[in-house]
Image (cartoon, rainbow, N blue to C red):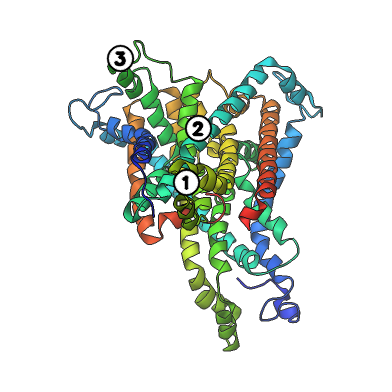
Amino acid sequence: MSAAAPNVAAPSVAGPSGGRLRPYALNAPALAVVGTLIVVPLVMTLVLSLHSFGTYTGVTDDVSLANYVEIVGDPYFHEIFLRTLRISALVTLIAAAIGAPEAYILHRMARPWRGIFLLVMLGPLLISVVARTLGWALLLGSTGVVNQGLMALGLISAPLRLMHSETGVVIALVHVLMPFMIVAVWASLARLDPQVENAAASLGAGPFTVVRRVVLPQIAPGVLSGSIIVFALAASAFATPAIIGGRRLKVAATLAYDEFLSTMNWPLGAAIAVLLLLANIVIIVGCNRIVERRYAEVFR
Amino acid sequence: MSRNGPLALVFHALVVVFALAPIVIVCVVAFTSHGYLSLPTEGPSLRWFYAIGDRPEFLRSVLDSLWLAAAASTLAVALAVPAALAIGRERFPGRGALLSLFQSPLMIPHLVLGIALLRFFTETGLGLSRWTLLAGHLVVVFPFALRLVLTASAGIDRTMENAAASLGASRWVVFRRVTLPLIMAGVVSGWILSFIQSFDEVTMSVFISTPETTTLPVRLFLYIQDNIDPLVASVSAALIFATVIAMVILDRLFGMERLLVGPGRG
C-alpha cells in the first residue's frame, strides 16, 4: 500500500522513508471502517435508550431518562441484575480456583505432556460456544449423565434440577471461560524464575510454603487480570445462559435480547445494553488500573 | 526441575475430565441409533449424520458461515496490514488513541455490538443483508487480525527495506518483495484466528442475521432454544470434528501456544 496523493505533489512530505502523513494514510481505511461501525452505532444506541416506547406508538422521539429510572426502580430488574452479578462473581471465583492451580501444574509438566494438555485446556476456545453449551445441556438434564451417575452412586435419590438453574449456568460458564484464566496465569508463569522456587526449597520450605510464599505472589497479577476478563465475559455472556438458563432464568444479556426481539421494546433493551457496556468498561479499565498500580514492579 | 506430586496429578486429571466431558458427550450422543437423546446403547449409528442431509437449511448455513468467515478475515487482514505497519513501527500523534479504538471491539460485549449494529443498519436504511452481517463480522475479528500482524511487524529489521529501496525498488515492490514476506507468518495466523472467531460468533450474529443469511452457530442456537434432539448433537459433533482437524493443522503449522497465548488478550 503506497501513501495517498501527496506522493507526487509533495515529495518532501512523503519521502522514500515515509513522511508525516504516511502513518495516517495507512490507518485511514481501518479507521473509516471501525470508526463508522463502532462509534456511530454506539452513539445511536445511547440516543435510542433515551427514547420511550408504547405498544401502539412504537419508538417515540422524546428524550428522557425514563428507561433508566424504570430499570433502577423495578424489583424485577433488580433480581435479574443481582443474579447476573452473583453468577459472574461465582464463575470468576471458581475459574480462578481451578484455572490458576491447573496452569501451574501445566507449567511444571515435562515436554510432550505440557504441550498436549495445554492444547486440551485451550483448544475448547476454538470450538463453538453453542456446541460446548449443548454438551452441558446433555450432561445436566434430569436424565443426563451427571444425574444418572449421582443416582447410580446412591448420592441422590431424585434427579437434581441443574438445567434452568443458576448452578447449571455457573458450571457451564466456568467451562466456557476457564481457558481465559489459564491463558492469563500462563503468561505470568512464563516470567517465573524456577531458581527462586529451588532456593526456597533448599532453605527448607515445604512444597505448600513454596507455592504460598513464592509462586502465588508472583502469579497474583496474572490471576487478577484473568479474573477481570472472566468476570467481564461472564457478566455479558449470552448464548450459555440462554441455553442452560432457558427463558425463565434470565440474566442481563438474555433480558436485553428478549426486550429487543420478543417484546420489541427497543429503547428499554438499548438502555440495558448501555448499562452492560458501562459496567464492562468500568470493570476492565478500573481493575486494570488497580492491578497495574499495585503490581507495577512485577510488570517491569 | 521438580515434578508434580500425586495430589496435583489427581487434580489435573479431574480438570481434564471437566474440560473434555461436554465435548465428548456431544460426540457420543451424536452416534445414537435411537430417535431421542440417549447414549448409543445399541452400538454406534450414523443415522443422525445422514439426517443432516435431509435438512438443507443446515448445509446452507455451513456455506454461509464459511463464506462469511473467509470474507471477513480477508478484509480484516487487508485493513490490518497497513494499520499494523504504521502503528507497530512508527511514533506519531494519535497512535495510542487509534490502537485503543481498533482494540475496542474486544471490550464491547458482543450483545451490545449486535444491538448497536441492528439499530445502525435499520436506522440508516441499509437494512439487514449478508453484506451488513459481513460488516459486523469484520468489526469483531479485526482486533485479532491486527494483534497478530502487529506482533509480526514489530520485529522487522528496517535495514532490509532500506537496502531494497536504495537499490531502486519502488515502494510497492519493497512492500511485496521484502515487507510482506517478513510479516507473512503473522498475516496467515491472523487470518486463521479471524476465520475461527467469525465462524464461531453467535451473540452479535443473532441480532443481525436474516432468514436468508443465518450462520451455522445462529441456526444451531435458535434450534436448541426450541428443542434439543440428536440432530443438533450430530451437527455439533461434525462442527467439533472439523475444529479439531483445523486445530491439529494449526498446531503443526504455527504452534497453538503462540496463536492463543500470544501477546495481549487470549
- Asked if badges 2 and 3 are on one and the same chain, I answer yes
The residue that appears at 65% across and 38% down in the rendered structure is A280
Q: Give SS at disc 1.
A: loop
Labels 1 and 2: the sequence-earlier one: 2
Q: Position of residue A240 (x, y in %)?
A: 49, 31
Residue density around tag 1, few if under 14, some if 14–19, many if 20 or more, within 10 Å: some
The residue that appears at 71% across and 65% down in the rendered structure is A24
Toward the viewer: B186 or B138?
B186
The residue that appears at 37% across and 33% down in the rendered structure is B22
Labels 1 and 3: the sequence-earlier one: 3
How far is disc 1 from disc 2 in space, using C-alphas? 28 Å
Q: Amino acid at mark 2?
A: Ile
Q: Dividing the image into 4 quarters, which one contains the N terminus of chain B?
A: bottom left
Residue B131 seen by the camera: no
Q: Which residue is mark 3?
A: A154
How far is disc 1 from disc 3 in space, using C-alphas? 42 Å
- Asked if badges 1 and 3 are on one and the same chain, I answer yes
Query: Is B79 located above or below residue A145 in the figure?
Result: below
Q: Which residue is mark 2?
A: A94
Toward the viewer: B63 or A295?
A295
Locate residue A49: give its quadrant: top right
Q: Give SS at disc 2.
A: helix
Q: Amino acid at mark 1?
A: Ala
Direction front: furthest residue: A204
Q: Which residue is mark 1?
A: A205
Identify the subunit bearing mark 3. Answer: A
Locate residue A83: give its quadrant: top right
Identify the subunit bearing mark 2. Answer: A
Instruction: Classify residue A12 as left or right of residue B59.
Output: right
